[in-house]
Every structure is written in structure tokens, then in C-alpha cells.
Image: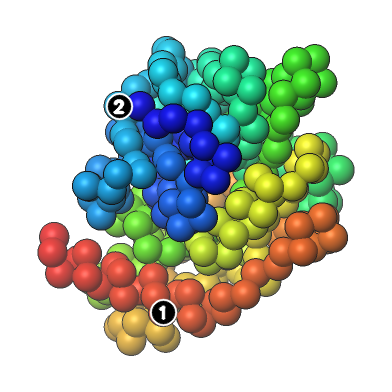
Amino acid sequence: MFARSANSPITVVTGGAGFLGSHLTDRLLSEGHRVIGIDNFITGNPDNLSHLVGNDNYRFLKQDVSNFIFVPDDVDYIFHFASPASPIDYLEHPIPTLKVGAMGTHNALGLAKAKKATFLLASTSECYGDPLVHPQKEDYWGNVNPIGPRGVYDEAKRFAEAMTMAYHRFHKVDTKIVRIFNTYGPRMRLRDGRVVPAFIGQALKNEPLTVFGDGSQTRSFCYVSDLIDGIFRLSQSQFHEPVNIGNPREMTIREFGEHIIRYTGTSSKLEFHPLPVDDPKVRQPDISRAKSVLGWEPKVSFEEGIGRTIEFFKSRLCNV
């Protein structure tokens, strides 16, 4: 067990073997935290944690937080990142997605209450649905189809936000909510289903890049180290309302595909397919709140970040 120390906080990260959870763990360890990672590997990858083997400041518990969370240690912070996050994952696991957003969040908040810990919820820009406001600010309530195929993820996160604020208001738990916009970088799964690994993987294999619709829908891509920096700053703040963290540089999916073709030097072409149900037409964060409250804005350029990500996927494809 870790013993509580003022100079070395004890921090729980649910979803700790995921893309974001593992990067967050690295940042927390670098900041002097002792970290307890929790994951059931429904979408997490043990390889994301292999570099932590033998680290005395890290422990891992294999648990499904939708069923229970047992942590005997004192706890100072809880980062709730457990959830399928890509469309192929939450369409394949709709019930677990809803359960981790509802019961998993309830369990994690209960742990925070019992341990008197600070709680940070990983929410999502999907709370805005297919937005009628552009760019999206935190005071926009969204345009979500609750019974569509994406509703299992969107509504799970919206419920998680409501539960988090209820614990803050009623139980006085110190809570934070980050709304995460499209993020990319090393440790994304090769077959994640999201556009960054899909396009890079297809390009490196000289396969057609699958574009849904006419490619005019927009996304804004934030490099993972920038996102994690914003999340860490939020955890150290006294702010309790949701905060957008993402890169406001917006581009169409067609433009993104053309960038990937150019940066990889592939012979691939764009191949167009029907647009999925409820796919958002635009996505761009208004980060005014993050700038004013956290002093945060992204630093890594798209060119630098996508270059690092392509190199990561090259190394992984060589080992497949």
C-alpha cells in the first residue's frame, strides 16, 4: 500500500491502460504522484504500461469500475478515464459504455467522497452532439440524438457530467470536468476506428483512405501532450464547471486525408463512403475558458504532432 504524503500524492487513474490514461499516468509520475492504474482491458492495452514495470511509484489493479472499485490506500486524486471512446468500440460495447458512464462514474465519485479526494471526469466534445453552434463553448447544451447509435456514448458522458456536478453540489466533492476534443498521438490503437489511426494505417499500407460522406465535415486535432497538460492544469485548479481542452485549428476530413497522403508519401487515394448516422458535421473547441482559467493553449503544431504519430505507426506496423 502507498501511505499518504504531502509531497507525493496518491492518484487513481481509471482506464489507466488506455491511450489517454497511460499518457496521463506518465505525466502524473513526472509530477511526483504515486499512481494506481485501474483497467479491465475491454479497450485498454497492457503494452501502454509495459514501460512502468518495476516502477515503485506505480501499481495496477485489474478491475471493472462499473461493478466495484476497491482501493485500500489513501487517495488524493481520482481521474476517471474509463470508457470505450471510439465509435467502433462503443458500437461493439454499447451496454458497457453506458454502464461505465453511469455506474462507473457513480463508483468513482463514491470513492472520491469516501477518500476526500479531488475528482476529475474525462468528458467529451460529443456532449455537443451534431452542434448547431460553432465553435462550441462550454455553455452550449448540445444537439444530441439520445436513441441514435452514438447516443450510448454521448448520453453516458452527459449523465456522467450531471452526476459529477451533483456530487460537487450535494456532497461538496472537489470535482473537475474536462471536455476532450479529438486527440491523437503515439499509443493510439492501429485499428482504433478513429480517423487519425485509420488514415495513417491505410496510407502506410498504400490502401485507399476511407472518407465518410463528401469529406466536408470538420474536426480539430490536438496532440496528446498538449491535452494532458491542459488536464493536469485543470486538476490543480479551483474551477468546477466543464472546460474544453482541444486544438481550435479546424480542417475538413478531406483536407486531413490530403495531409496524410503528403506526409506519408503514399500512393493512396481518397475513397468515399456513406456518412454514418449522426456523424457531427463540425467540431471546433472554443478554448477561451481554458486560456483564462488555466493559462493553457496548445503548443505542438499539427506538422510536428502528426510526424511523431506517423513514426509511431510505422514502428508498430513493422512489428505486426
Q: Position of residue 277 (x, y in %)?
A: 56, 40
Question: Relative to 135, is 11 above or below?
Answer: above
- Mark 1, residues whose alpha carbon is within 10 Å: few (<14), some, or many (≥20)? some
Look at 61% across and 52% down and name the residue there.
232
Q: Is residue 79 above or below residue 308?
A: above
Tell me the mark number nearer the camera, choosing from 2 and 1.
2
In the rendering, at what x and y percent does residue 14 appear? 45, 33
* Left or right: where 282 falls relative to 213: right
Q: Do the CB atoms of the residues marked 2 and 1 lie less than 8 Å apart?
A: no
Q: Residue at x 41, y 79 (%)?
A: 307
Q: Secondary structure at mark 2?
A: strand
Identify which amino acid the numbered label 2 is placed on: Lys
- Please name whichever residue, 22 or 203, is drawn nearer the observer in this view of the structure: 22
Q: Residue at x 80, y 43 (%)?
A: 239
Q: Is residue 216 left or right of residue 259?
A: right
Find residue 193 and report its horizontal and vertical position in percent.
39, 50
Find disc 1 in the rendering and name its residue.
307
Q: Is 193 in front, or is 30? A: 30
Dividing the image into 4 quarters, which one contains the N terminus? Answer: top left
What's the coloring here?
rainbow
The answer to which of 89 and 185 lies nearer the viewer is 185
Instruction: Give the residue type that dot 1 points to.
Output: Gly
Residue at left offset 32%, top offset 36% = 59
**Residue position marked by numbered label 2 in the rendering:** 62
Mark 2 burial class by Cα count in 10 Å: few <14, some 14-19, many 20+ = some
